[in-house]
Amino acid sequence: MKWLKKDNWKMPVIGVVGLLFALYTVLLRPSFPNKEPVVSPPVSPYINNVAGIGVIEPKSEIISIATELSGVVREVLVKVGDTVKVGDPLFILDQREVNAQIKLLKAALEVAKVQAKDADAQFSLVKSVLDNRSVARDDYNRRKYNVELMSAKVDEVQAQLDQAETTKERLIVRAPIDGQILNLNVRLGEFTQAAFLNEPLIRLGDVTTRYVRVEIDEENAIKITPNSVANGFKRGDPGNPINLKFVRFEPYVRPKQNLAVAGQRVDTHVLQVIYALEATKVPPYIGEQMDVYIKIEADRKNED
């Protein structure tokens, strides 16, 4: 036939072969068993409840420690997990330059004090003369003003010394509160900048009591009160609820940060509620997530 001579038969045959291969691949591919979760998700202990995702934080919230001045780290005095008191040094920057400046200013201060004593002695000589006509007015005024000048010089050098000692103190980064070192990102010999850092040098917090910061969708915020009973479950431990005690509401409603599933809307606004966790044998880690369920009163209209 004419169409066979022109090789028009090849395209339909190739199409049929491709279709058969596709059917074979789809119909005969191996089936995979449904994956079961390693740990079952927690179940709310309340019939009527509002659920939210919470993040564990210290009582003080997490404090990001920075340095007031830039410099090279010469000493790191703490490690992760250490407990510190307010004012304890955490790390020290290079102080050699400021130490030399302090030494120089201390010497200059001694010189200024000696000059002030000499000026005072010279002025005392002319003041002790009984006959004022024996001393020239210019000489009297010169010695008088020289006393004031040397006194001001002493104050000036003392102020410079105080400034240098303050700078030295600022090169020692100290703990602002009593707390525990949660994270350490400063190391011996590194250069630290006195600027905003994406990764803080040290994270510090008061972990004597752990709080959980729960995000409640704004449409459910009206349903909860400070007296609402709440329980939380650590991820991976659905069988051990932790009692929660209300601490406060955060008055600022903000965009949602903790997303339960990928692809969730991020334009949802949430009310943040802070609860204190009761003491447990194994306290949760800071930054760990919790599933929180808050009991609410049943809606009478729905019951009717």
Image: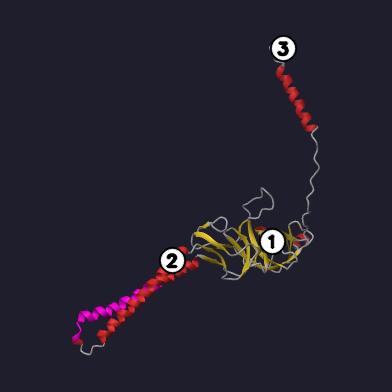
Tell me: 72 left or right of 59. Answer: left
Splitting the image into 4 quarters, where does residue 187 fall?
A: bottom right
Q: CA distance from mark 1 to mark 2?
A: 45 Å
Q: CA distance from mark 3 to mark 2?
A: 100 Å
Q: Main secondary structure of the magenta part?
A: helix
Amino acid residing under circle 2: Ala
Query: Of 69 and 299, which appears nearest the observer?
Result: 69
> Which residue is depicted at the point 37% across and 71% down?
108
Amino acid residing under circle 1: Tyr
Tell me: 212 left or right of 186. Answer: right
> Which residue is depicted at the point 80% across and 32% down?
27
Number of labels in the image equals 3
Q: Is residue 255 positioned above or below 161 on the image? A: above
Q: SS for tag 2?
A: helix
In contact (CB < 8 Å): disc 3 and disc 1: no
Task: Write down the region rendered in magenta.
Answer: 134-158
Q: Mark 2 highlights which residue?
A: 100
Q: Mark 3 highlights which residue?
A: 4
Q: Nearer the viewer, mark 1 or mark 2?
A: 2
Tell me: 158 left or right of 11. Answer: left
Please state the horizontal and vertical placement of residue 105, each as a whole percent of the image.
40, 70
Q: SS for tag 3?
A: helix
Residue neighbourhood size for the residue with mark 1, other residues' Cα within 10 Å, grouped as few (<14), some (14–19), many (≥20): some
Q: Mark 1 highlights which residue?
A: 285
Please say whether residue 155 is one of the residues in the magenta stretch: yes
Quarter in which the N terminus is drawn: top right
Quick one: label 3 or label 2, which is nearer the N terminus? Answer: 3
